[in-house]
Each structure stands twice: as C-alpha cells, then as structure tokens.
Amino acid sequence: MDSLFQAAQDALSENRYSKAIDLFEQVAKARPDDIETHYWLGVSYWDRDQGDEAIAAYRKAVSLDPKGESDWSLYALENLAEVLTRTDHVKESQAAYEQALQRETRPEWIEKIKNQLAELKLTQGIYEPDSNTIFNARHEIIGGIGLGGMHTNHYFEIARHTNDPVKEAKYYRLAIDTDPSMYQSYFNLGLALLHQGKYREAVPWLLKSDSVWRQDSYDNPDGTAKTDANAFLTLCFLELGQLDSAAKYSSIAANSSGFYFWERLYTARLATAQGKPQSALLDLQPLLADNPEQPEVLHAMAEAYLALKDTAKAETYLKQAIGFIPDDHPWMGHLKAQWREKLGRL
C-alpha cells in the first residue's frame, strides 16, 4: 500500500489530479483511518476544482483525530477552512478557522488565521472597527482590516468568498462603488465576466484594472503594466476575433513579466489564430507537460492540430479537454458546452 500511496503522491506532484484522486481513493479504502491519506485526497480534489469532494475529504481527516493530536488533521482543518471560504460557506469557514486557531502554534499561521477571521467578519458585516480602520465618505469600511491592515471592503470580501461568477460580478461592482481605488476589484470583475463568456463586457474592466494599477504608486512604484489584466485582454480579443488587439495586449503582457502561464497560453492560441500553429505547438507542449489535465491547454492543442488539418489529434485533445472539466465546475460549464459542439463538427 505504501507504493500505491507514493504513486498517488507522484501523480499529484505532476498535476495529474484525476490519477492522484483515483489512487488516494484506493489507499483510503484500504486504510480508512489514515489521516494523511484523507488530507492528500482533499488536496487532490481541490486542485481539480471539486470543492464538495475536497470538503468531504478534509472533514474526514479532521474527524479521525477528535483529540487534535495530529499535525495532518490540523493541516486538513486549515485547508477545510480555506475551501469553505472560497465556496460560499462563510460561517462554517469561520468556525473551522476558530478551531484551527486554538491548535495552531506557528506564529505566521496564527497571524494568517487572524487575518482570515477579520475578512470573514467583514464579509458578514460584523467586523468591529478599531483605531486602524479606514472609512470612505459614506462611512463604509475600506481598509485597515486585521493585523495586516488590509485594503478591502465588505462587498469585495463577499465576492472573494464565492466561486459563482455571477455573484462575483454583482459584488465586485459594489466593491468598486465603495472604493474605486482598488485595482483588484476591476480585474476580478473582468475575470468574473469572461468566466461567463462575456468577453466584450469584460474588456473595459480589465483595461481599468491595468490603468488603476499603473497609477498605484504604493503597490506599483515603477508604474508597470498589470500582466494578468493584459493576458486576459488577449483572451477576450481572441474570442472576439480582433487579432490585432489581441496581439497588442499579448505583447504588453509578455514584456511585463518573466513567465506567466496565462500569457503563454493565450499567446500560443493567438499564434494559431494568426496561421502559425506549428509555433503555437512549440509553446504549448511545455505547458502541457507541466499541466497535463489543464482543459484550456488541451483545447489550445486541439485548435493547433485542427489548423494543421490533423483532425484525429484535434479530436483526441478536445475529448481530453472536455473530460477533465468536472461536471459541477463553477464556471467552465459554458466552455464544456462549446467544446462539445465543436467536437460534434469535427
């Protein structure tokens, strides 16, 4: 069984989440009381964006240590709190963090948990202001939160604590109204919109994010471009069929960072759209080697092979792309539907 556990660890380290899940599930059946196995099963599920399954695995790991004596159960409890935080289980997340705080001894984690609890209380509208709290003209809290004096607000935190892109978009708009100086609100709103397939609507918010970021002398003293905003602008214009604009923002993103996954991916897709699929494949192959189950990479491979008239390989990669999207994925459902239609036309 140790060799099976190691094989699962190896699969996880290679980002082969489906294989890791299958192997850890086998180990868990053979060793149902092993806390560490259930912990790693939770990690594997969460890495694959399967929140409900991750929550169940982490809860199991915690339940196996009712006296709180194992480090693995503490790690599972902290990861459980994180997943709950990101999936609209705010009160449950708060309870898990409070339980973890009673056990935690590492100073950096104690500070992290206290900051998370401050954010969760702000989300629920029960944060108690102190002398460090910063307000806007409407006396709404916009900063000085927690030990780190975080720059945030009630609506921004509501949006951060969900993975529903429709809810995210609603509350990031309110966050911008509360505090227009937060570049991340504009970016996150743009991302929430493109996750709904609303590429044209996402563009102005991503542009605004880049503009506000360039003017932020505190976080960005050099006034550089916002790499992620420009990478996702590349995607938006690709999907809108505006290749000149896609090329413009791809160039900005490429020149403002060393390696950024999404810039490399969307620049490769741009190469295919520009009639250079061989060049695209050269850039995509290392991305695929490091991310063998990433649906967008697999879809980009399919696009490149389709451009090369290699329908068999295109079909293989497209089937894999569709297969690696969980049925209950919070935002990739619209891509899965589009790709199934594309597969039907091959």
Image: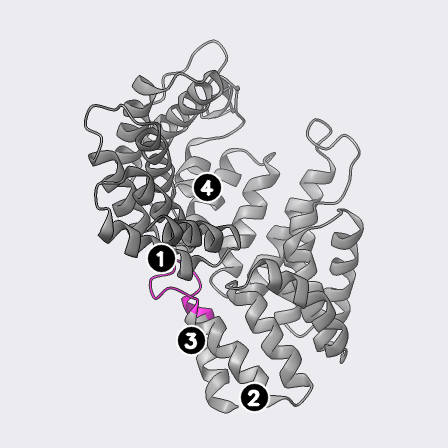
Element assignment for label 4: helix
Mark 3 vs mark 1, CA separation in Å? 29 Å
| 9 w.r.t. 194: above or below | above
Q: Which residue is rendered at x = 34% and y = 48% of the image?
A: 41
Q: Is disc 3 surrounded by few (<14), some (14 to 19) or many (20+) residues within 10 Å?
A: few
Mark 4 vs mark 1, CA separation in Å? 44 Å
Q: Which amino acid does label 4 sit on?
A: Leu
Is 330 part of what is drawn in magenta? yes
Viewer-side label of 4, 1: 1
* Residue 26, image x, y percentages: 29, 56
Q: Which residue is rendered at x = 64% and y = 45% of the image?
A: 209
Chain part drawn in magenta = 324-335
Q: Name the residue under label 4.
A: 174
Element assignment for label 3: helix
Q: What residue type is labelled 2?
A: Ala
Is 233 part of what is drawn in magenta? no
